[in-house]
Image (cartoon, rainbow, N blue to C red):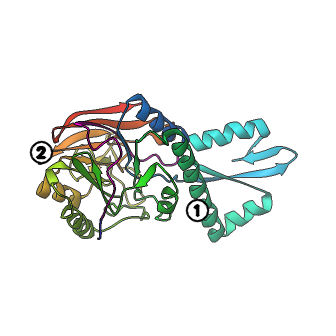
Amino acid sequence: MGLFRRKQPDGVSDKKQIKILFTSDLHASDVVFKKFLNAGKMFKVDVMIIGGDLAGKALIPIIDLGEGKYEINGEIVGREGLQVVTQRIRNEGNYYVITDKKGYEELANDKSKLDEAFKQAMIERLREWVKIADERYSGTNIPIYVNLGNDDPPYLFDIIDESNVMKRTEGFVIPIGDYEMISFGYVNPTPWNTHREMSEDELYSNLKTMMEKVRDPSKTILNLHAPPYGTNLDNAPLLDKNLKPVVRGGEIVMTHVGSKAVRQIIEEYKPMLGIHGHIHESRAFDKVAGTLVLNPGSEYNSGIFHGVYLVLENGKVKTHQLITG
């Protein structure tokens, strides 16, 4: 894998102390994305990072019945009710499409048309986010570094590239003051066969190639969507063959689902910091071979923002704080 080196962010290179806000797994939630932008200014950070999974998971059809009436999941609403419902859909991280009855039947019976509607909804939402970020952060010299996760189709990189302040990270070594960041949004295989998955061997090979491009592993930030295996960051419900959580004694059984390749890379290179996502239930920090690793967790569908506030100083993580809002 070839890695390019991005330009040092203006106003960051000469700072002894660097403040970072990291989040992940926004999954198309409007309110969570806006809270992230607000938090960056509130904490007066130098750099903002989104670790992946920008895309939502559901497309909700809204049938235009005419005469100002709309049907949503069997409920009939007027124009004012439509605004309330669509905003709720957006805040919960879902998409919607307004169509007539004929269009609804076509979506229900033609997978290609449904896929295209889903694609356009994803592109439109991310393009709206780009516009909001550019309006709020242009002229601030605060970069918003963005990666895609396993749930994100690769064409969303093209939308990120339309932004003036949102910069894609995958494929680049990102200089942040005296430090460097590498990013990778692929994860080890999941039961859902998502857009960006790799075997552990493939993950290890890619990550090793990337680590060989950095100047000093001890001053490197690993922005990897998959958390390291066997830590506080990768606990998720154990699933049965029907992909339902296993319950024993009235309790959901948890298991480790992170990447063994990610763990191996951390153990071998001992980077300064690992920032991860992917496992929404595992909001936590831990250490692997002395390296601090963090996962802010995600409650995007409840409109709750989860992030990590970090302060880097003298080649170390001086402060780390899990934040919620």
Is residue 41 rendered to the left or right of residue 207? right
Of residue 20 and residue 234, the one placed in the foreground of this image is: 20
Mark 1 surroundings: few (<14), some (14-19) or many (≥20) residues within 10 A: some
Is the magenta region chiefly helix, strand or loop?
Answer: loop
Viewer can see residue 275: yes
Q: x, y percentage for residue 182?
A: 28, 56
Is residue 63 rendered to the left or right of residue 13? right
Residue sitting at x 54%, y 47%: 129
Of residue 109 and residue 32, the one placed in the foreground of this image is: 32
Is residue 322 rendered to the left or right of residue 264? right
Q: Let me know if residue 12 is in the magenta part.
A: yes
Q: Tell me: residue 23, above or below residue 121.
A: above
What residue does disc 1 label?
A: 119
Question: In 3D space, how far apart are the residues under numbered discs 1 and 2 (Cα atoms)?
Answer: 42 Å
Please, what is the three-letter code of the amino acid marked with disc 2?
Gly
Q: Let me know if residue 318 is in the magenta part.
A: no
What residue does disc 2 label?
A: 290
Of residue 53 and residue 254, the one placed in the foreground of this image is: 53
Please, what is the three-letter code of the amino acid marked with disc 1?
Lys
- Where, quadrant-wise, is the N terminus in this rendering? bottom left
* Sequence order check, earlier mark of 1 and 2: 1
Q: x, y percentage for residue 155?
A: 50, 65
Quarter residue 23 falls in: top left
Label drawn at residue 316: none
Q: x, y percentage for residue 109?
A: 68, 68
In the image, which residues are magenta?
4-29
